[in-house]
Image (tube, rainbow, N blue to C red):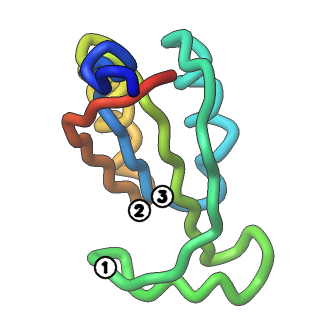
């Protein structure tokens, strides 16, 4: 049985929840920072910008994007995302994790 500590390494999980209209901009931002992969899901919820029901495709809908990056990349991504927050419903957070990727 192998030692798990040799398989995984420190990383950061970024979770971004925002309006569907931001999808292409967020993906472009992630690729600019050499993100090798991400996952996108349609989500529902309620927050400061009101209730998001995902009732019509592309209207009043939210997405959740998750990606695993280095700490340095997460800093740059979060700073860039903050600039979009004033114009759109958008929240992002990061968690320290251990992963293989």
On the image, the x and y values in percent for residue 55 come to 70, 89
Q: Residue at x 54, y 24 (%)?
A: 30
**Residue 77 seen in render:** yes
State the mark number for residue 18.
3
Residue in front for this viewpoint, 97 or 47: 97
Asked whether the residues under the numbered discs 3 and 1 touch, taking CB atoms below 8 Å apart as contact, a structural biologist would say no
User: Measured from the top left, where is residue 24 in percent x and y?
Assistant: 69, 38
The answer to whether marks 3 and 2 mark residues whose Cβ atoms lie closer than 8 Å is yes
Residue drawn where x is 58% and y is 61% of the image:
63
User: Residue tagged by mark 2?
Assistant: 89
Secondary structure, mark 3, is: strand
The picture places residue 58, in percent across and down from the top left corner, at: 75, 68
Of the residues tagged 3 and 2, which is closer to the observer?
Answer: 3
Residue under the point 37% across and 25% down: 77
N-terminal-most mark, 3 or 2: 3
Q: Disc 3 to disc 1, how far (Cα)?
A: 11 Å
- For label 2, count other residues whose C-alpha is less than 10 Å away and answer few (under 14), some (14-19) or many (20+): some
| Residue bearing mark 1 | 47
| Residue 79 relative to residue 50: left or right | left
**Tag 1 near tag 2, CB within 8 Å:** yes
* Above or below, comparing residue 90 to residue 58 in the picture: above
- Mark 2: which secondary structure? loop
Q: CA distance from mark 3 to mark 2?
A: 5 Å
Label located before the other in sequence (3 or 1): 3
Front residue of 55 and 11: 11
Pick the quarter of the image with the N terminus: top left
Residue 18, image x and y in percent?
48, 58
Q: How many marks?
A: 3
């Amino acid at each position: 049985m192998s030692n798990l500590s040799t398989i995984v390494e420190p990383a950061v999980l970024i979770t971004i929840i925002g309006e569907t209209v931001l999808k292409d901009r967020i993906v472009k931002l992630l690729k600019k920072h050499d993100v090798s992969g991400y996952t996108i899901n349609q989500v529902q919820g309620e927050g400061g910008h009101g209730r998001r029901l995902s009732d019509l495709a592309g209207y009043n809908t939210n997405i959740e994007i998750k990606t695993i990056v280095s700490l340095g990349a997460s800093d740059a991504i979060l700073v860039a995302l903050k600039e979009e927050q004033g114009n759109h419903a958008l929240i992002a957070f990061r968690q320290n994790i251990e992963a293989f990727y």
